[in-house]
Amino acid sequence: METRRIDPVNCSVARALSVVGERWSLLIVREALDGARRFGEFHSRLGIARNLLATRLETLVTAGAMRRVPYQEPGDRQRFAYELTEQGKALRPTLVALLEWGDTYLADPQGPSVIVRHRPVEDASPCDEPVKVVLECAAGHSHLAPEDICRTPGPGARFLESD
Amino acid sequence: METRRIDPVNCSVARALSVVGERWSLLIVREALDGARRFGEFHSRLGIARNLLATRLETLVTAGAMRRVPYQEPGDRQRFAYELTEQGKALRPTLVALLEWGDTYLADPQGPSVIVRHRPVEDASPCDEPVKVVLECAAGHSHLAPEDICRTPGPGARFLESD
DNA sequence: CGACCTGAGTTGAAGAACTAAACTCACAAA
DNA sequence: TTTGTGAGTTTAGTTCTTCAACTCAGGTCG
């Protein structure tokens, strides 16, 4: 029997990681989701080296996850800030999934340092319950376990000869 | 008004990334979820350098995401394989989230190369519908958007002076 | 027995990436 | 004119990756 294997390099996970898989990238996105906008904010929050921060921001802007927007404070010249695009905001589930994994298996003895809550931006009476990531299929089956899932070739699949 | 900011370094995302944030780590986990077990399988599927693969596997084993198990093929000596622990399998949502992001924003023109489907391991009539990651709060509100969510300090939070 | 083969690593040299600290640049305020 | 500030850039030193060659333990072939 000849088995065909999906080429693991032609894969959206690999492509995603080429954008956000470098050191600091996801932490920069996390800080942006938490409201950071300016170069110095990212720098002081994360303690990342300045040249790397400049490189990472450029990568994220080029990839379309962030955008460089001019701003000007009164009595100061124009500077630039960085904000997430929709594409960048769409990394939220990835970050929540990582957070959850870290909380579950690598937790601080004191417990998690951050809890993500259901609190819509403009809602006077927020729900405030903790948020989790769940896997759900298009038929509505929810809370799928890792064993309930398999990978199948999609339209863009390339195959490898199995030798 | 003095605002307190959660220390971004004392964070489960950062801790999670210290284990799986290195180049190749998540791809190794992905291949393991897809059935790879042996050193040579990871090597030939991913094209990763052998020494790095050895280092990464060791990191994953040390962190508890994988385990090194002896195996012996008939007429061959004992060798070692690597398999995911529960902790390692729990990275599935993270990988699905990354896959989804990559598919949405960095797709191959032909379409996704991999589709994750709801197909329980031992089920003769699988559902087979595509699987997505969704954010859901403990009160049951599902499909939360990035704006519906905020980060709040947890029991292990450290704070920074805002200067 | 001894030469050769295989899978699973290890070692070493060259190149790429990361860090930290100093430096530049454009403008504003004193 | 001098000083200060945010936003980078440059540079030198360290660490990480890659690639290729080598080791190691056992099995097979002649």
Image (cartoon, coloured by chain):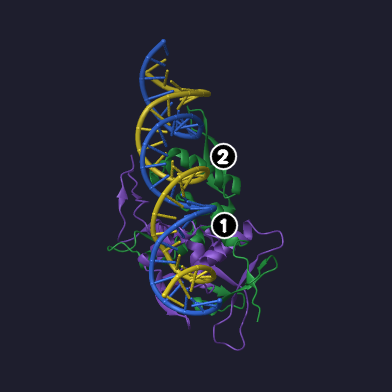
Chain colours: A green, B purple, C yellow, D blue
Q: Is residue A98 left or right of residue C5?
A: left
Q: Is residue A82 above or below residue B76?
A: above
In depth, the one of B72 and D5 nearer the eye is B72
The quarter of the picture where the C terminus of chain A appears is bottom right
- Crowding around mark 1 (Cα neighbors within 10 Å: few <14, some 14 to 19, many 20+) is many
- The residue tagged 1 is A16
Q: Is residue B54 above or below residue A68?
A: below
Which is more N-terminal, label 1 or label 2?
A: 1
Please, which chain is the residue tagged with disc 1 on?
Answer: A
Q: Position of residue B114 (x, y in %)?
A: 63, 68
Is residue A53 visible to the viewer in this orientation of the structure?
yes
Q: Position of residue A85 (x, y in %)?
A: 58, 50
Q: How many marks?
A: 2
Q: Is residue A44 above or below residue D2?
A: below
- Quarter of the image where one finds residue D6: top left
Given this view, does label 2 or label 1 mark the residue nearer the observer?
A: 1
Please give the name of the residue rendered at 34% of the width and 51% of the height, measured from the top-left corner: B7
- The residue tagged 2 is A69
Q: Position of residue A101 (x, y in %)?
A: 41, 66
Q: Position of residue A115 (x, y in %)?
A: 39, 62
Residue at the far bottom in the pictured view: B124
Please give the name of the residue rendered at 61% of the width and 84% of the height, measured from the top-left corner: B126
- Crowding around mark 2 (Cα neighbors within 10 Å: few <14, some 14 to 19, many 20+) is few
